[in-house]
Image: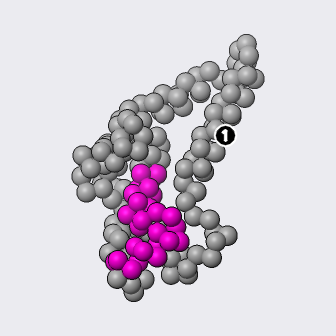
């Protein structure tokens, strides 16, 4: 309604920013190529992990698939390209990222909701992946969202 000067450019730049983030997200999390012949048991394990990411362990998924942990880890990595632990961690971090920017939950609550054993472990894993803490991530992305709303 309040069409300030260059509002169309502001809208276009916001759309491009969103598309850039989506493409980067896809590139980072495209860990599975379903065109490959992925073992049916591994497909079953991926569903189990996605449905229970906050409580699942490598051992529990291996048992769910009726495999030993070592054998399961071997065939999982062969099919997916990551170890089961790396995959579970990536799912937990992705969920945490979503919660950080879409909720007002505390860092501790988000860590627990996403299956991290402690806040310090969560912060350490998050910082290792992103190079900054979850709080810095939250501030950066929530301020970017509010800025793009204010400019339109």
| Prevalent SS, magenta region | helix
Residue appearing at x 47%, y 47% in the figure: 98
Viewer-side residue, 24 vs 99:
24
Counting every numbered tag in the picture gives 1
Give the residue drawn at x 50%, y 81%: 41
The quadrant in which the N terminus is found is top right
Magenta region: 69-95
Foreground: 41 or 148? 41
Which colour scheme appears in the figure? one colour
The residue labelled by disc 1 is 19
- Residue 132 in sight: yes
Q: Residue 144 in the image: state x and y as whole percent.
A: 52, 29
Q: Residue furthest top?
A: 5
In the image, residue 129 sits, relative to residue 113, either above or below, namely above
Q: Position of residue 29 (x, y in %)?
A: 54, 54
Secondary structure of the residue carrying tag 1 is helix
Q: Report whether 15 appears left or right of 87.
A: right
The residue nearer to you, when weighing 145 against 69, is 69
Q: In the displayed structure, does residue 70 sit left or right of residue 37? A: left
Relative depth, front residue between 77 and 93? 77
Residue 72 inside the magenta-drawn segment? yes
Residue 109 visible? The answer is: no
Q: Residue at x 69, y 23 (%)?
A: 10
Q: Position of residue 132 (x, y in %)?
A: 37, 35
Q: Would residue 84 be counted in the magenta stretch? A: yes
Q: Quadrant of residue 22?
A: top right
Quadrant of the rendering where the C terminus is positioned: top right
């Amino acid at each position: 309604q309040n069409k300030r000067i260059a509002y169309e450019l502001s809208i276009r730049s916001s759309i491009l920013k969103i598309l850039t983030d989506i493409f980067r997200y896809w590139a980072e999390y495209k860990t599975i190529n379903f065109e490959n012949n992925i073992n049916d048991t591994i497909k079953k394990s991926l569903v189990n992990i996605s449905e229970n990411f906050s409580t699942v362990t490598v051992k529990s998924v291996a048992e769910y698939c009726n495999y030993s942990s070592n054998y399961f880890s071997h065939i999982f990595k062969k099919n997916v390209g990551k170890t089961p632990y790396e995959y579970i961690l990536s799912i937990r971090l992705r969920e945490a990222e979503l919660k950080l920017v879409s909720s007002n939950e505390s860092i501790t609550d988000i860590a627990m909701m996403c299956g991290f054993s402690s806040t310090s472990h969560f912060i350490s894993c998050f910082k290792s992946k992103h190079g900054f803490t979850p709080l810095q991530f939250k501030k950066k992305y929530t301020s970017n969202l509010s800025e793009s709303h204010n400019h339109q």
